[in-house]
Amino acid sequence: MTAKTVIRMGHPTLRLVAELVDHNDIFTSAFKELLTDLYDTMKLEGGIGIAAPQINISKQVTLIELPANSERYGTLHTSPLFIIINPVITIIDHTLQGFWEGCLSVPGLRGFVERPRIVKIDYIDEFGENKTFVAEDFLATVFQHELDHLFGKIYIDRITDTKKLSYLQEFSDFNSPKKEDTLDE
Ligand code: ZN
């Protein structure tokens, strides 16, 4: 395990636009190590996504994986492991959908965020190949949350109704939406 410390809201790195990854760097052992560190950290922290800036590496890399055996998400939302490098996001369907979001960099809180329902992501994968993925519904929110980290944004910035920002305990006491409508990244 090479899990790293997750930096928290207030750390300036979370507010930077992360640097693009040089294509040649993708094939270096240092970059592979970064991917391993991100994966191990995501797993240790129980997240379904993590972005390099969250471990204080200001590069445009993020991992997303909704595991099939997740207690929180069950089998409703699953995905393979995505390794996303230098992404460009395009909104396909502007219809807003809301989920209660959490973030490894904002521990102890939940907030309700509305985001577009379908987005297209053009990116480079871990083999240096150009890829395109269209994310819908819950997964679209996960992608937008993670990609925001690469551009200096945190989900707190996206909350339009601050009455829907809550500590975890109060969230479970008073909001308790269906489990599948929440995410931790
Ligand atoms: Zn996050």
Image: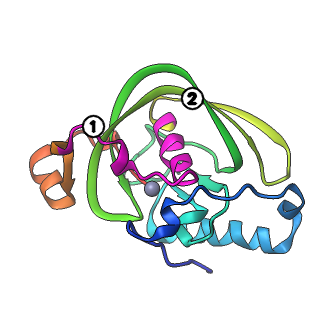
Q: Is residue 162 visible?
A: yes
Q: 78 above or below 184?
A: above
Q: Nearer the viewer, residue 113 or 77?
A: 113
- Specify the quadrant that holds the N terminus: bottom right
> Label 2: how many residues lie within 10 Å, few (<14), some (14-19) or many (20+)?
many
Q: Residue furthest left?
A: 174
Q: Quarter of the image holding residue 25?
A: bottom right
Residue under numbered circle 1: 160
Q: Is residue 124 left or right of residue 92?
A: right
Q: Is residue 113 left or right of residue 34?
A: left
Q: Whole-percent x and y of residue 185? A: 45, 55
Q: Which circle, 1 or 2, is nearer the viewer?
A: 1
- Kindly identify the residue that appears in the image at 70 percent across and 70 percent down: 34
Q: Quarter of the image holding residue 123?
A: top right
Residue under numbered circle 2: 119
Reply yes or no: does residue 92 show up in magenta: no
**Ligand 1 is located in which of the four quadrants?**
bottom left
Which residues make up the magenta segment? 140-162
Q: 6 above or below 83?
A: below
Reply yes or no: does residue 142 show up in magenta: yes
Task: Indicate the amino acid at tag 1.
Answer: Thr
- Mark 1: which secondary structure? loop
Q: Nearer the viewer, residue 104 or 151?
A: 151
Q: 90 above or below 103?
A: above
Q: Whole-percent x and y of residue 132? A: 73, 33
- Mark 2: which secondary structure? strand
